[in-house]
Image: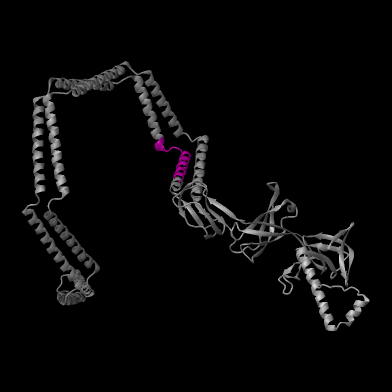
Amino acid sequence: MRVDVPIGRRTGGEASALRRLPFRRLSVLLAAILLSMAAGYVGYHRYAAATQTVAVPQAVPVRTGSLVSTVTATGNVVAARQAKLSFPASGKLAELNVAVGDSVKAGQQLAKLDTQALEIKVAQAESDLKTSQTKLQQLKDGATQEEIAAAQAAYDAATAKYKELMAGPTAADRQAAQTALDQANATLAAAQAKLDQLKAGPAQADVVAAQSAVDQAKANLAAAQAKLDQVKAGPTQADLAAAQSAVDSAAANLKSSQAKLDQVKAGPTQADLAAAQSAVDQAKAALASAEDRYQMAQNGNLQEAGGTSNSALQQAYDSAKSNYDAAVQKLQQLQAGPLPADLQAAQSAVDSAQASYNAAVAKLNDLKKGPLPSDVAAAQSAVDSAQATLASAQAKLDQLNAGPTDADLVAAQTAVDSAKSNVASAQAKLNDLLAGPKASDVQSAQSALASAKADLAAKSSPPKVTDLALAQETVTQSELSLKQAQLDLQNATLVAPFDGLVAAVSFNVGEQVSGPVVTLVDPKSARIDATVDESDVAKLAVGQPATVTFDALPGTTLQGRVIAVAPSGTTTQGVVSYQVSVGVDSPPKMLPAGMSASLSIETNRKDGVLLVPNRAVRTQGRNRVVDVLVGDKTETRTVQVGDSNDQFTEITSGLKEGDQVVIPTTSTTQPRTNVPGFGGMGGGPVMIRNGR
């Protein structure tokens, strides 16, 4: 800032004195005056006021551009395609093939329930369908000749039984009833005799038998005790010698088997090969001789061939050929070395001999160690069992000697009473037969006859339309049940409906699942949901362009468009707001849901219009005016305005591009301290603030 200090008019004496001062002294005086005035100015502004703002004009050119009106808002990223996938029915989770963050393709299997019960339902539904189809086909085919014959036989049997019932009991029936009565009387007599015997006391034969059982039990106990004593005493020298002999025999067998295995592994000796080669040579010579004799017989010299017939010579030749082939094969086998089967058989024999040897050694060692606790326990158990048997036999003998107990007498009396009841029942049945058929028996026989007659008629006649319709409906119901079971089985596998990322997994394998199991999102189809004030919602419409920025992604700016504006608002603490959704045109590969975003939605746009800053336009009376800089002066012009935004106003007339319009700005002077030579008081820098 330049400060012009005006110098007032001097009087004539002062001017004359000044003129008389030398130029150097005049310059010093003027400098001192200027410095004093500057110091006073600074001191005044420092101590009289902290800052002082004055209006400073600023000119900007009128330009042609685009007038863009926007609405700003903040919101969050929301996945436009999101699916919370669950099974239609609850069950135990058997497979879980994804984890949070996995990328999946449409149709990929994500999870699967335990399908054992569902597979059983499908099999049951298939069986039910086959059954209903078979019944329908049977109904359409009608009864077979065998079924008609069976129905006829059942009808004949029911007729015969009815006639027999109406004719009364036969002599055989009366005889059977009489026999049953006689048997019941015999049973009663036996029960009464047993009761009388109990009351009379035990027979001498029963006492003798009981005493014999006691003696036998004592003998068994003595034998068991002797066996226990023998086990506790340990093995005898004879037992040890026998066990040692078994070990020696098993060792000899093992040695022989090992030698046989070594011989097989070593292969044939030169002597074996020479013997086999000799056998081949002999067989070859025999074959040549047989072939010569056969050829001689073929040429008509049967006598020289030494044969009786061509067939005999042919058999001799075939036999020689077979012997030669066998000798060659044996030689080749010896030359090729041992066969795997021979090695396996020899090794198996060694293994078996080794197992037998180990068992014999183990048995010998067990004998040397003495009896096992298990052997002692088994022998003791046998003694205990023999003692229990002896006690039981002695108790029975004592019981016989003591006579029957009250319980025995009660049981015998009960048997007598039951036998008497059976006699009464048999007598009543005989009386019923002699009295003829009852009305209930006749009615039952008539019902059975009518049922057999109806069954015969049904099988002899074609099926009714209603029966066919009912069977067809059963087949339809079975088909629907099968389709439902198959659908339930299919729904037990969870697949991805679209390409995306796994956002959440709610269950683990083995748990009972109910509700969403996997949450899938499509990161390529993201949108921004934000809220705007009620004063701005009227400016918004679907399709308006928007710019999206993110605090968490510096430098990332995305373009999008408004895809939805909520028709109703939400009131929070008296403030009404509306939700607006903006779709992103080309989202990056990863745009996490929930991330904060800032929106700038373009609500109106005019291209190629004259623009001036809003602060350049003011109201004067009924007109809108601006100050235009013309040369070094300003003039006020009346203008016509159009639309405006928060920064610029459209000028429809009154200005042209390039005109310089004046906008008011502020100039602030701040105090500066510690100026050398001025005791901390001096001039400061000038800061210009644009009020935009």
Q: Tell me the quarter of the picture where residue 409 sits.
A: top left
Residue range of the region highlighted in magenta in the rendering: 124-147
**Residue 595 percent coordinates (x, y):** 61, 58
Q: Is residue 244 above or below residue 672?
A: above
Q: Tell me the quarter of the picture where residue 248 sits.
A: bottom left
- The color scheme shown is one colour
Question: Residue 205 or 334: which is nearer the viewer?
Answer: 205
Look at 8% across and 25% down and name the residue there: 204
Q: Is residue 691 visible?
A: no
In the image, 450: left or right of 308? Answer: right
Q: Is residue 522 above or below residue 184?
A: below
**Residue 434 percent coordinates (x, y):** 30, 17
Question: Residue 129 or 690: which is nearer the viewer?
Answer: 690
Rendered-image quadrant of the C terminus: bottom right
Q: Tell me the quarter of the picture where residue 659 sits.
A: bottom right
Rendered-image quadrant of the N terminus: bottom right
In the image, 265: left or right of 238? Answer: right
Q: Residue furthest right?
A: 12
Question: Residue 623 or 509: which is nearer the viewer?
Answer: 623
Q: Is residue 543 above or below residue 321?
A: above
**Figure label count:** 0
Q: Mostly what secondary structure, the magenta segment?
A: helix
**Residue 660 percent coordinates (x, y):** 84, 69
Task: Check if residue 257 falls in the magenta segment.
Answer: no
Q: Is residue 658 visible?
A: yes
Q: Is residue 252 above or below residue 416?
A: below
**Residue 259 percent coordinates (x, y):** 15, 68
